[in-house]
Amino acid sequence: MECSIRTAAPESARTGCLVLGVHGAALGEAARRADRAAGGLLARLVAQGDLGAKAGATALVYRPAGLAAERVLLVSLGERADYGVRAMREALRGAAQALAGLGARDATLFVEDFAVADRGLEDAVRHAVLVAREAFYRFDELKTEKKAPAPKLATLALALAAAPRVPASARAALEEATAAADGADLARRLGNLPANILTPARLAEEARRVARRHRLGVRVLERRHMARLGMGALLAVTRGSHQPPKLIVLRYRGAARRAKPLVLIGKGITFDTGGISLKPAADMDEMKFDMSGAASVLGALAALAQLRAPLDVVGLIPACENMPGGAATRPGDVVKTMSGQTVEILNTDAEGRLILCDALAYAERFAPAAVLDVATLTGACVIALGHVASGLFANDDRLAEMIERAGEETWDRVWRLPLWEDYQEQLRSNFADVANVGGRPAGAVTAACFLSRFAKKYRWAHLDIAGTAWRSGREKGSTGRPVPLLVRFALRYAERA
């Protein structure tokens, strides 16, 4: 689906479906204009109770007299006093889902009436694109029989009735949201592919394809390169798998002058059995999503290149499987990391931090301005924050604040957790510099504290997306989070660099 933005008159807009917002019983500005042309039809429909009060409820009118549109879709925004970002997104999602079930090939949504008062038009434009694109996303490339027909809607115009022209800021918001939605779709697709298809080698090929399309620099390090670099932690994770590991290095150069890059690191465990510390069988199929950090970094880089963002970004993706086998790493083994620190591996299912610690050490060679790693790292973060917010850890307050703000702006919210030195005691080992786990208490915190030992030479933040990267149950599938957050953060970072 293609999204655009333009000015339009609701009463004369020729479109397959006119989408108008309603607060309680009060029509929005665009809806009032359409209602006058329709002889009060829309107001009567609302007064009769045909439109539900909850944000996202819809009511459809076919070929209303006095309007040029083939259909009018009224969308409830809920009560004005309670209207905020959550209600706006629910309303936009309800509209998108209704449009997906229609035969209309184009629609015009009057986006001004959906805007939250203190957040502005640009915010509403971004959310309209991202919510609609997510609602229209389908993953059925592996099915021989398509159960549900694809939506017929091909174009969605975001319309402005009050403005004489489209502001440049609104066009920029549309471009950003379109690129972020493209990146999120890429991340969803990679996350949804099964592990027998999306192997580390296939992930590297996908990265090369993205690099060719967007003219990124790309290099893929093989096992022998990792061995020469001393990446003993990353290699320890791969020992039980027949699939060779890959360290994917991507670079986007968009800064006008030579500048220190922003480094994004994505955990790329294409399947995680837990290794010798084997996971329970129930829901283990969802461990194909353990490369969601890698997918989000790849999607964000593609989006930033598409936008020609004015900054330099390096993407690092350590990719491998974590499998049991005769050669697999055992609990109690001690390995030496690229940084020179030794690690006692007490639990082979705490493998993400092992591949990330070597990637964090490798990031030093780029003399980064800041590093952000993204990983489905701990079940403990899911227990702490559920499936709403991602966990944020950082050794720099300003960096953390920028990520928090980007999360609020994209409604991909994060919650900062501590990195206090007190927690490091849980990682004490009698046989190595550090243990890879610190027991059940504060599991997400101790995992981040482990990573912090390898990120002391630069500004660093860590996002634990274990609870937000995918959905379970009937709606099982990748969410594409946190691609929009990463794009918004990188653009804000470029403004302040």
Image (cartoon, grey):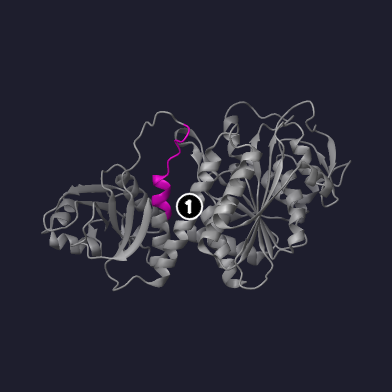
* Position of residue 229 measured from the top left corner of the image (x, y, whole percent): 82, 49
For the image, the number of numbered tags is 1
Q: Is residue 119 visible?
A: no
* Position of residue 22 measured from the top left corner of the image (x, y, whole percent): 26, 57
Quadrant in which residue 269 is drawn: top right
Q: What residue is shown at x 18% (from left), y 49% (from top)?
A: 61
**In the image, residue 18 lies in the stretch drawn in magenta:** no
Q: Nearer the viewer, residue 253 or 66?
A: 253
Q: What residue is shown at x 58% (from left), y 39% (from top)?
A: 289
Q: Nearer the viewer, residue 131 or 238?
A: 238
Quadrant in which residue 237 is drawn: top right
Amino acid type, mark 1: Asp
The residues colored magenta run 130-142
Q: Is residue 476 left or right of residue 74?
A: right
Secondary structure of the residue carrying tag 1 is helix
Q: Is residue 45 visible?
A: yes
Q: What residue is shown at x 88% (from left), y 41% (from top)?
A: 430
* Position of residue 475 measured from the top left corner of the image (x, y, whole percent): 45, 37
Q: Nearer the viewer, residue 330 or 369?
A: 369
| On screen, residue 321 above or below 280 | below
| On screen, residue 31 above or below 53 | below
* Position of residue 493 measured from the top left corner of the image (x, y, whole percent): 59, 67
User: Considering the image in quadrants, where does the C terminus appear?
Assistant: bottom right
Residue under numbered circle 1: 182
Q: Is residue 196 left or right of residue 436?
A: left
Quadrant in which residue 271 is drawn: top right
The residue sitting at the right extreme is: 431
